[in-house]
Amino acid sequence: MKTAKIESLLQKSNVRPTAMRILVYNFLLENEAAKSLTDLENYFDKSDRTTLYRTIKTFEEKGVVHQIDDGTGTTKYALCEQGCNCQIETDLHLHFYCNICDETVCLTDRKIPHINLPDGYTAEDANLVIKGRCEKCPE
Amino acid sequence: MKTAKIESLLQKSNVRPTAMRILVYNFLLENEAAKSLTDLENYFDKSDRTTLYRTIKTFEEKGVVHQIDDGTGTTKYALCEQGCNCQIETDLHLHFYCNICDETVCLTDRKIPHINLPDGYTAEDANLVIKGRCEKCPE
DNA sequence: ATAGATAGTGCAACAGAAGTGCATTATTCA
DNA sequence: TGAATAATGCACTTCTGTTGCACTATCTAT
Ligand SMILES: [Mn+2]
Ligand SMILES: [Mn+2]
Ligand SMILES: [Zn+2]
Ligand SMILES: [Zn+2]
């Protein structure tokens, strides 16, 4: 994607398009799998960890990316779909973690099914992670 | 529960019932909510963190407790039900995290529904956490 | 164009959770 | 009883996430 296009996308989300932010956005765009802060740190070894941290936090606040807790212990991030409403309410799609290649992907078209809770419990949010073998890791 | 009863339960799971292990087992038994290593550390302030850590790890290996990743960033543990087969395959019940009281409970009778994955994906394990308001935290 | 305000960046330091090496102590069993 | 084995306690380390503060870049109004 052209830099100019990313710039305007960021501006639409009220994120000032700095050089670093454009690079991070592009990195997330080119990778199908969700990325952690450490992934960013390793890829952008010229940049500081804090900058990347704050970049991703800004993206998150402004609804550019959403957090993924895949159970590995490290939080990952992926770009939000166009029209995703993570900011207001969580977009309850599920995530898939591959035990073989150690990558996590959004399955945006698979929504978390509704669960009947015991009396007195009210659901506000949900997180569903399926672990197994991904399509790129044949047996 | 009587100490002798706990002793025999531990022995059945091939865990040598030391004083500390019996205390930890009892603590988990008396608490409905799942507990973290830090919770144990705070409660048993006489004991060393490493001992508690290895106690809970032993319990986990021997199928006495199961891990819960509730998305808070700290792993919690709860006793396995009688007849639970966590060791062989994960008992796919879901967990509930209360945003108000910050406690996590097993909903052992609510199983994670089967999800149809895209072609090429195979599921081996799953984790579902519902977040909201628990029965003890009325509005 | 300039100055002041605002926003972003980089370094250092810190906190919390998890895990390991090793010496010491307790328990088991031959 | 003594050797082997298991459990415990202390110190130290790693990893992830987070914050304070100074410095720099960018923006905006004059
Ligand atoms: Mn996602
Ligand atoms: Mn459980
Ligand atoms: Zn894979
Ligand atoms: Zn509650």
Image (cartoon, coloured by chain):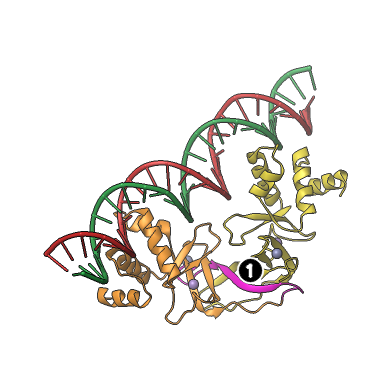
Chain colours: A orange, B yellow, C red, D green
Compared with residue B37, is residue A23 higher up or lower down, i.e. above or below? below
Q: Is residue A139 left or right of residue B34?
A: left
Q: Please identify the quarter of the rendering in which residue B34 is found.
A: bottom right
Residue at (50, 75) in percent of width and height: A86
* x then y, percent, for residue A50: 38, 54
Compared with residue A55, is residue D11 higher up or lower down, i.e. above or below? above
Quadrant of ligand 4 in image: bottom right
Find the magenta span and give its range: A117-139
| Residue kind at label 1, given as amino acid type | Lys
In front: C11, or B81?
C11
Q: Quadrant of the N terminus of chain A?
A: bottom left
* x then y, percent, for residue A71: 56, 61
Q: Residues within 10 Å of mark 1 (few under 14, many from 20)?
A: many
Q: What residue sits right under mark 1 in the picture?
A: B131
In front: B11, or B139?
B139
In front: B63, or C3?
C3
